[in-house]
Amino acid sequence: MNTATTTADAPKQRSFLQKVRRMARRQPLGAGSAVFIMLMLFVAVFADIVAPQDPLDMNFADQLIGPNMTYLLGTDELGRDIFSRIIYGSRTALQIGFIAAFVGATLGLVLGVTSAYLGGWFDLIFQRIMDVFMAFPLIIMALAIVSVFGSGTWNVIIAITIPFIPKCARVVRSSALALRDIPYVDAARASGFSHTRIVLVHMVPNVMAPYLIMVTSFVGQAILLEASLSYLGLGVQEPTAAWGLMLRGGAEQFFESAPWVAIFPGLAITLAVFAFNLFGDALRDALDPKLRSM
Amino acid sequence: MHKYLVKRTLMMVPTLIGAAILVFTLMHMIPGDICALRYAGTGGSFDANLIGICREELGLNRPLYVQFFTWLGGFFIGDFGESMWTGRAISEEIGVRAVLSLQVAVMATIVSVIIAIPMGTISAIRQNTWIDYVVRCFSIAGIAMPSFWLGILIMLGLLWTTQNWFGQAWIPPIQYVSPIEDPIGNLTQLIWPALATGYRYSAVATRMTRSALLEVLREDYIRTARAKGVIEKLVVNRHALKNSMLPVVTVIGIEFAFLMGGLVVTEQVFNLNGLGKLFVDSVTNHDYALTQALVMLVAFIFVCMNIVIDLIYAWLDPRIRYS
């Protein structure tokens, strides 16, 4: 009996490798970006091993040297190795990107589903509050929060997370509204389950598709936002290696004589955000084609 | 139509009040208070009485609700308070810089429309061909590229080309000249930030044009037009493009309202003394009064833009106009 079911199901159950291959064929761009993201994660986690030099090590004898064999991408105005700083910068970018995206989207998920589930006055007022948040561009909101809490890595995470919450809540709410009237939610209510249980166990798992899409698109946006804040001097502070920060100061001052200082960190930001956006697009196509226009 | 307009205008009031409450609460969440923080930054050697005087001046010793309503009431008579850094009236500080930012914003919007609509259209007509892929990559790259980096690249490109082609390195002048006094000087200065900001914003509009046009091209009346022998150019321009413009107008309108966000970084790169730079300076200098006023200004622009979008809708779509 047991063997019979396995043989019958065998054609349907593909091995992990086969699934990956199929995905790569259907979504070449998405698969490519996934590989790039994994590479970035690897580099960020093992930055100590991958980086050829100490990112904070200043060699005043080697200021603003062009790319060569010792300094693959040259050095900045303090004689620090740009290649190593970009590698360590990926750690900063991904850490801030993932934490802000995950926390922001998750809080938005819970709030959005709750709002759709409860409906009535709560939903109405909640929607108006979301409207207010949506009236500000991300960076304006983030800067206003930075002006209150101050700069530094953790404050930057807070400043990026808060404006994400309403963005995700709004999208999730509209998906969850359709769920509210589905019989199994009624059934759960009739069984006398608590609101918390219905929201978390019965509704949240069914809005995972828009949630996951939001998380990936948020990571890219968060990296970009962190880079902008750091570039403005209001984000991550020296001497931490951060891509946006590397474009500040020396990069602008010496870009005539040492263009590599300005080019490579920006390229790193662009490639990282590009990868997350492509991956997000592929994920959206795969999970929920209806959300394409989003 | 008048009724509609009045209704729309009234609907913006709750959002603005909400924004005011949000901004006010945020600024009062500052650990300690504005005055203590202001003097703490000077290095510690200050007269304790100064804090008291500062509080008195800013009215921080009054009850919160009085502060809120005084602040909110100021907006109606154009009194945004005084900058805590320069001591000048905020309306004056904003007024000086608004022209420059507005000009860059308008130019950036024009740039993004010029890029977005033709590219989105080509991409939709030639769906799934190499042109489509190039356009899509171009627009995703626009979203991924930080506009300050693009600004730096533009400057580098300018330096390099002028150096090699004309023998003399040239970068855009920093001193602002009015477009009325010296239109060419003004344009050579502001076209670059407009390009940097506009390219980024064109990305969203390009994608929207593409998807809206693709949807319209599948409609029955397009098939009818083709069947009765209308040439393809007319089908696209007259029948399809016009009807796909509604979502594109929304995107462009909202982007215009959000341009302030893009200007924050672009003005920094090109060293332009506009609203974006003022905003960054206000945050850097802990000038809370100014930050508050500027954040409110952004919300106000956003709400007004929404009304403008609705009006353009009514103009574009007669069904809305006559309902």
Image: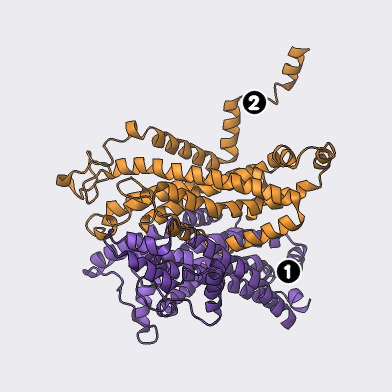
Chain colours: A orange, B purple
**Disc 2, SS:** loop
In the image, residue A30 sits, relative to residue B316, either above or below, namely above
Which residue is tagged 1?
B229
Q: Nearer the viewer, residue A43 or B304?
A: B304
A96 in relation to A18, above or below: below
- Residue B43, given in percent of the width and then of the height, sits at 27, 59
Residue lying at 75% horizontally and 50% vertically, measured from the top left: A118
* In-image side of B194 versus B185 (left or right): right
Disc 2 marks a residue whose amino acid type is Arg
Q: Is mark 2 in CB contact (under 8 Å) with mark 1?
A: no
Say which quarter of the image contains residue B230: bottom right
Instruction: Give me the residue at 84% from left, 39% from top.
Output: A187
Residue that badge 2 annotates: A14
Residue sitting at x 65%, y 69% = B14
Q: Is residue A135 left or right of residue B263?
A: right
Where is residue A89 shown, x and y percent of the image? Answer: 36, 44
**Picture coordinates of residue B313, whole percent (x, y):** 67, 73
Q: Nearer the viewer, residue A3 or B82?
A: B82
Q: Quadrant of the C terminus of chain B?
A: bottom right
Q: In the rendering, at what x and y percent does residue A80 appear?
A: 24, 45
Q: In which quadrant of the rendered view does residue A71 lie?
A: top left
Quarter that holds the N terminus of chain B: bottom right
